[in-house]
Image (tube, rainbow, N blue to C red):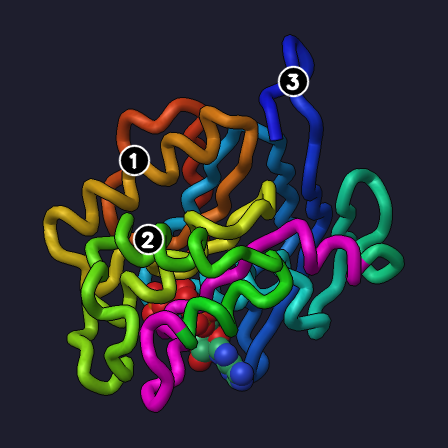
Amino acid sequence: MTPQQGAQQTLLSASELYCERDDRVLFEGLSLSISDGELIQLAGPNGAGKTTLLRLLAGLNRDFNGQLLWHNAPMTTVYSEYAHHRLYMGHLSAVKKSLTALENLRWLTAQDKASEEELWDALEQVALAGYEHTPCLQLSAGQQRRVALARLKVSKAPLWILDEPFTALDKDGVSWLERELQSHVSNGGAVIITSHHALEGIPGLRRIELGGVA
Ligand SMILES: Nc1ncnc2c1ncn2[C@@H]1O[C@H](COP(=O)(O)OP(=O)(O)OP(=O)(O)O)[C@@H](O)[C@H]1O
């Protein structure tokens, strides 16, 4: 994954999205596109529809109207390819508490076919060296978040779709994740993120505000 010299390439585009839940319109006429080297931050109050939109963009929820294209092809026709090229992390850490940190990371990155060395290295980079064989139920909330975030060091997906990834992280964890986001877009990746955290200073950052209660 190297940045294109000159022209950017549109990875994902959405046009005229309409979505309602419980008879309430969350968004309508919503269009956006993201290219390599860009980071989109979805903002808005609680209940505005940020998680809902992320799940639509990740192809995990088809209960909407509008069009999603991955590399200019309808997402439904290229979904299996898309699923290998986007990394989705929900707002819960999604680690299995009975499994160790290493087992969780192995499971979360199964499609990346990472070596054991890469997995150990990723855990070290999120400051979990020495916790590889610790069951996640014995880790703090922030450490469990770090296990989930270690995926970012292993994945080769160009598009990251991240729902509140800063949750439970301490100051060092926040700085680490900011650097990872910056590094990913600088290396030609793209990120769509929901976060109440300020993300100033990342090149290619755009903010999209969702409306809130109608
Ligand atoms: N599965 C569902 N069934 C019915 N309504 C839902 C469902 N999921 C979400 N909603 C409704 O959709 C609205 C948007 O929820 P969503 O989680 O997308 O908001 P959000 O902007 O991510 O909020 P927050 O900042 O609190 O995480 C909420 O009002 C919620 O009640």
**Image side of residue 188 versus residue 211, left or right:** right
Name the residue tied to disc 2.
Answer: 195
Which mark identifies residue 4? 3
Quote the CA–CA distance across marks 3 and 1: 21 Å
Q: Are marks 3 and 1 in contact (CB under 8 Å)?
A: no
In this view of the protein, can residue 136 be seen by the observer?
Answer: yes
Q: Is mark 2 within 8 Å of ligand 1?
A: no
Tell me if residue 105 is in the magenta stretch. no
Quote the CA–CA distance across marks 3 and 2: 28 Å
Which mark identifies residue 179? 1
User: Which image quadrant is residue 60 in?
Assistant: bottom right
Say which of marks 1 and 2 sits in front.
1
Q: Magenta span covers which residues? A: 79-102
Query: Where the C terminus falls, by quadrant?
Result: bottom left
Q: The disc labelled 2 sits on which kind of residue?
A: Ser
Asked if residue 156 is positioned above or below residue 194 in the image, the reply reads above
Residue that appears at 68% across and 63% down? 59
Q: The disc labelled 3 sits on which kind of residue?
A: Gln
Choose between 71 and 183: the one closer to the eye. Answer: 183
> Where's residue 167, x and y in %?
25, 62
The mark that comes first in sequence, 1 or 2, is 1
Rate crowding at label 2 as few (under 14), some (14 to 19) or many (20 or more) other CA atoms within 10 Å: some
Q: Secondary structure at mark 3?
A: loop
Ligand 1 found in image quarter: bottom left
Residue that appears at 28% across and 48% down? 125
User: Which image quadrant is residue 101 in?
Assistant: bottom left
